Amino acid sequence: MEQFLSNPFTQPLYFFRLTAIIFAITFIRYLVVSGVYHYLFFVWLRPTFQKRIITVQTISKRQMRQEVWRSFLTSFIFAFSGSALVIFWQKGWTQIYIDWNAYPIWYLPLSLLLALLVHETYYYWLHRWMHLPKVYKWVHKWHHDSIETSSLTAFSFHPIESILQAIVVPILILCIPLNIYILFILLLIMTLSGTINHAGVEIFPKGFERHWLGKWLIGASHHDLHHKQFRYNFGLYFTFWDHWMKTESPKYERHFRAHTGNEVKN
Ligand SMILES: [Zn+2]
Ligand SMILES: [Zn+2]
């Protein structure tokens, strides 16, 4: 182990084993979370959530197979990023900490918010760049092949886009001191937001589109319009960049109200 820690790249078997384990966890987690979330809202709670379903057409088997295959490739790339993260940590290069007293207690939520804001800013501008016509066809088109989305779309990216997304967490942990549990919460938020935003069912409460906090959060109706309209709603977790850069869809509030049982008014 000590020899590995001095130079992990002299132990390729360890690196590949680690990557294989992280790949299995990532891909199985994707299938389980997508499956359970879909079953929950489209089967089990369907009578309650019927009016909140955004998906207008049934997703074809062909689209589902394509999304699972693309997510398989994405999981593989994310697994390399996960291995890099573990190795950085073992080498002592990261700012990850375990001791709760290393930083004041108020720093825990602040560090989570900071990581989310940095990720949001990176993703918003990456996303705007990926929509430039020349870049779009090589990098981002795979994700937009799904016009009607489902929870399976959450990881359906071209490998180049997956790499651009996978570098975020290893860079974050090199720059921002994060408690290990805050890092797990961050990874959980990433998984849940991808699932919620693509699942084709609005779960936010009525009136959230104008709520003081809700209007800053991205949910299924918001991201659905990105897949339908292409030129609006580029954000990941929050709407502030879309607000500032005037890229929020003018149809958003109406679309949200139409799927939360609210009367649709202009
Ligand atoms: Zn896009
Ligand atoms: Zn999407």
Image (tube, rainbow, N blue to C red):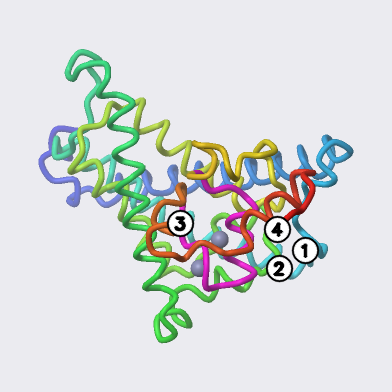
Residue type at the position of mark 3: Gly
Name the residue that disc number 2 marks: 63
Front disc: 1 or 2: 1
Rate crowding at label 1 as few (under 14), some (14 to 19) or many (20 or more) other CA atoms within 10 Å: some
Instruction: Give the residue displayed 39% in from the left and 60% down from the top.
Output: 124
Q: How far apart are the alpha carbons under marks 3 and 2?
A: 24 Å
Q: Residue at x 31, y 55 (%)?
A: 167
Whether pointer 1 and pointer 2 mark residues with C-beta atoms closer than 8 Å, the reply is yes
- Which residue is situated farthest in the top direction here? 101
Q: Does the magenta run of residues contain 229?
A: yes
In the picture of the structure, the residue carrying the numbered disc 1 is 59
**Label 1, label 2: how many angstroms apart (C-alpha)?**
7 Å
- Indicate the quadrant where residue 260 lies: top right
Kind of residue at disc 2: Gln
**Furthest residue to the front?**
266
Q: Is residue 1 magenta?
A: no
Highlighted range, magenta: 217-236
Q: Circle 3 sits on which residue? A: 235
Does 265 sit above or below residue 216? below
**Which element is circle 1 on?**
loop
The quadrant in which residue 92 appears is top left
Residue 43: image location, x then y, percent: 84, 41
The residue tagged 4 is 266
Could you tell me how far apart the alpha carbons at marks 4 and 3 are, in whole angstroms? 24 Å
**Residue 206, numbered label:** none
